[in-house]
Structures are given as C-alpha cells and as structure tokens.
Amino acid sequence: MRAIRTRSQERIFNLLKTIKKGISAQDIYVELRNTNQSMGLATVYRSLEALKLEGMVQVRNLANGEALYSLAQQDKHHLTCLQCGVSILINQCPVHDLENQLESSHKFKVFYHTLEFFGLCSQCQVNQAPEIGQ
C-alpha cells in the first residue's frame, strides 16, 4: 500500500523522476525555486526523509559528507576517489545473494543497498607518485 504523500513530497518525487543522477537537498531546493514551486529547505529535508522511509528515495553519502538523493530504482555501486571526488559507477554486485539470505533469515524487506569503495583514481595515483618519491 502506498503511503499518502504531501504536496511537497510529490513535487520532490516528480523532480527526482526527471533527474537521472543523485542531487543534493540544496540543489533540489534551488531547482524547485527556479520552477516556481518554492518550499523551505527544512521542508525539502523532511520530505526527502519521508520518501526515503517509504522506500522511494535512496541517499548516497559522499566522502566529503554531502548527501545525494535519487529514486530508489536499483542498487548502485561506486568507486570514489578521496582526492578529486570522481565517482565511477560499477555494475558488478557481490552482495545480491547476501541480500536475499538476509531478507529470508531476518524477515526483512530490503528496498535497496549501496556499496562504495573509497581510494585514489588512476589520475590521482599518477599525480601523487612524485610526492611519494621525495
């Protein structure tokens, strides 16, 4: 059964349907303001939290602490560089079997999961190599 959504939640949900990548709450606030659908930033955060609890929105926390929101359509996995912040989407998922086992053994409904590896991308490794030799 779908929860009853507020007008604010519907506006944010509809905006996220048009955006194919993660977006911060602040950027959602700006996008809505630019389309004359203005609402307070606190309302944006409350609406995102409600949509997340409903299983409709997922949040991805970056290494710098920024949270990016997107529709919870599929699991996403990333390699994230701690130096430059580049994020590389990876398609392999080693935890789907574990997810199924956990759902069964704990009677728990998983909406989505995230998997993120943090390190240095190839370009930052090259840039850092001269520093290591000194």
Image: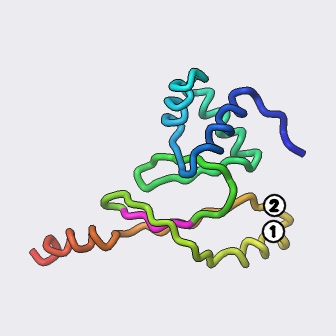
Q: Which residues are magenta?
A: 77-81
- Say which of 36 and 48 sits in front: 36
Mark 2 residue element: loop
Q: Amino acid at mark 2?
A: Lys
| Crowding at mark 1 (Cα within 10 Å: few <14, some 14-19, many 20+) | few
User: Where residue 28 sits in the image (x, y, percent)?
Assistant: 54, 35
> Which residue, given by chain and number where applicable, does mark 1 sit on?
103
Image disc number at residue 109: 2
- Quadrant location of the C terminus in the rendered image: bottom left
User: Where residue 87 sits in the image (x, y, percent)?
Assistant: 43, 61
Q: Amino acid at mark 1?
A: Glu
- Please tell me which of labels 1 and 2 falls first in the chain: 1
Mark 1 residue element: helix
Which residue is at 57% across, 21% downward? 36
Which residue is at 76% across, 61% downward? 110
Which residue is at 70% across, 74% downward? 96
Q: Quadrant of residue 86?
A: bottom left
Mark 1–mark 2 Cα distance, whole angstroms, equals 6 Å
